[in-house]
Image (tube, rainbow, N blue to C red):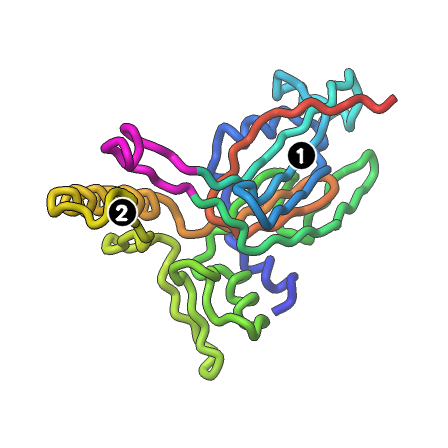
C-alpha cells in the first residue's frame, strides 16, 4: 500500500485533548522545530511546535486573514512530551493504597517534510488529506497504517510489540484478527509482584499481600480499560508533518524561545 492510498483511507478527527487544541490555536504559522525520540528512561518523545504567540486567538485569525500583516507576536513553543510515570493513590501499594503505571510508549514514528507554499506562505496540505495545520487523530479500526506495517515487516505479525495484542496478521492467508482498540472487561493486569519482607511470610502476611496485589491488579486493569490501547496521532504544521502510533496523549507546556541576535 502506497502512502497516498493509505492516507486516502484515513478517517480524521480532532485531537482528543481540547485544552491542547485551544492552546495550539494561539500560535500563528506553527512549525515543528523539534522531534526528539528517546529509547531509554521514562521520556519517550518530545515534540515542539513554534510560532508567533497571541493571547487572543482572534488575533491569530486576523493575521491569517491579513496574509501575515499586522503586529508580530513573540515567539513561543508548545512542547509536547510523552512520558511514562508511576502514580501512587491513597499512600501507594506499600501504604495500603495502589500504585499504577501510566505507560506512554511510542510504537512507530514518521516525519514528512512536505511543506508546499503558495503566495504569502499559504499552506496546502492536500497531500495529507487534512484541511489546515493542526492536531489530528486517525480513528479507523482497524488502522490502515498498522495493516501496512504488519504486511511489510517480516519480523513481527502482531501489534503492538511487547504488549497485549490488538492486531494479529496471518501471513499465509493475508488476513487480520482485530481485537479492537479497547481492552475487554475481562482484562487483568499481568504484572509480577514479590514479597520483600521476612522469609517466609506468615499466613497472615501472605493473605494481606495477596489482597494488596489483587487490589493493585484491579486498579491497573481499570486504568488500561479506560483508554484506547493505542492512538494514531498526526501533527500538521507549516514545516514538518509528524505521524505517531503511541499509547496515549502527551502532557504539554509552553516554552520560551530565545530571540535570535
Query: In the image as oriented, which residue stretches furthest toward the bottom?
Result: 172
Q: Residue at horizontal 57%, vertical 50%? A: 244
Q: Where residue 49 is drawn, which disc sits there? A: 1
Left or right: where 183 falls relative to 111: left
Q: Where residue 195 is drawn, which disc sits there? A: 2
Q: Residue at horizontal 65%, vertical 43%? A: 236
Q: Quadrant of the C terminus?
A: top right
Between 255 and 206, the one lying in front of the other is: 206
Number of numbered discs present? 2
Left or right: where 95 falls relative to 6: left
Queried whether the magenta region covers residue 249, the answer comes back as no
Residue 203 point in image, percent of width and height: 11, 47
Q: Is residue 17 above or below residue 185?
A: above
Nearest-to-viewer mark from 1 and 2: 2
Q: Residues within 10 Å of mark 2 (few under 14, many from 20)?
A: few
Residue 95 point in image, percent of width and height: 26, 31
* Alpha carbons under labels 1 and 2: distance apart: 46 Å
Label 1 sits on a secondary structure element that is strand
Q: Quadrant of the N terminus?
A: bottom right
Query: In the image as oriented, which residue stretches furthest toward the left?
Result: 203
Q: Is residue 70 above or below residue 84?
A: above
Between 44 and 210, the one lying in front of the other is: 210
Magenta range is: 86-102
Amino acid at each position: 500500500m502506497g502512502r497516498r492510498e493509505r492516507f486516502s483511507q484515513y478517517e480524521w478527527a480532532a485531537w482528543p485533548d481540547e485544552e491542547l487544541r485551544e492552546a495550539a490555536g494561539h500560535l500563528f504559522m506553527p512549525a515543528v522545530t523539534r522531534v526528539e525520540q528517546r529509547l531509554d528512561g521514562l521520556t519517550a518523545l518530545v515534540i515542539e511546535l513554534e510560532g508567533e504567540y497571541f493571547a487572543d486567538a482572534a488575533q491569530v485569525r486576523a493575521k491569517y486573514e491579513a496574509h501575515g500583516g499586522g503586529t508580530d507576536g513573540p515567539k513561543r513553543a508548545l512542547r509536547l512530551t510523552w512520558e511514562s510515570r508511576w502514580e501512587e493513590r491513597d499512600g501507594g501499594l506499600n501504604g495500603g493504597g495502589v500504585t499504577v503505571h501510566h505507560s506512554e510508549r511510542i510504537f512507530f514514528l514518521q516525519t514528512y517534510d512536505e511543506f508546499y507554499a503558495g503566495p504569502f506562505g499559504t499552506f496546502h496540505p492536500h497531500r495529507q488529506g487534512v484541511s489546515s495545520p493542526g492536531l489530528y487523530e486517525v480513528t479507523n479500526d482497524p488502522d490502515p497504517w498498522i495493516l501496512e506495517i504488519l504486511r511489510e515487516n517480516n519480523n513481527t505479525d502482531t501489534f503492538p510489540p511487547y504488549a497485549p495484542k490488538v492486531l494479529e496478521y496471518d501471513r499465509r492467508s493475508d488476513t487480520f484478527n482485530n481485537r479492537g482498540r479497547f481492552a475487554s472487561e475481562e482484562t487483568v493486569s499481568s504484572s509480577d509482584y514479590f514479597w520483600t519482607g521476612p522469609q517466609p511470610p506468615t499466613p497472615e502476611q501472605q493473605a494481606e499481600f495477596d489482597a494488596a496485589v489483587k487490589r493493585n491488579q484491579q486498579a491497573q486493569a481499570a486504568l488500561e480499560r479506560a483508554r484506547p490501547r493505542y492512538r494514531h496521532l498526526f501533527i500538521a504544521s507549516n514545516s514538518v508533518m509528524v505521524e505517531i502510533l503511541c499509547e496515549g496523549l502527551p502532557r504539554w507546556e509552553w516554552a520560551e524561545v530565545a530571540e535570535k541576535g
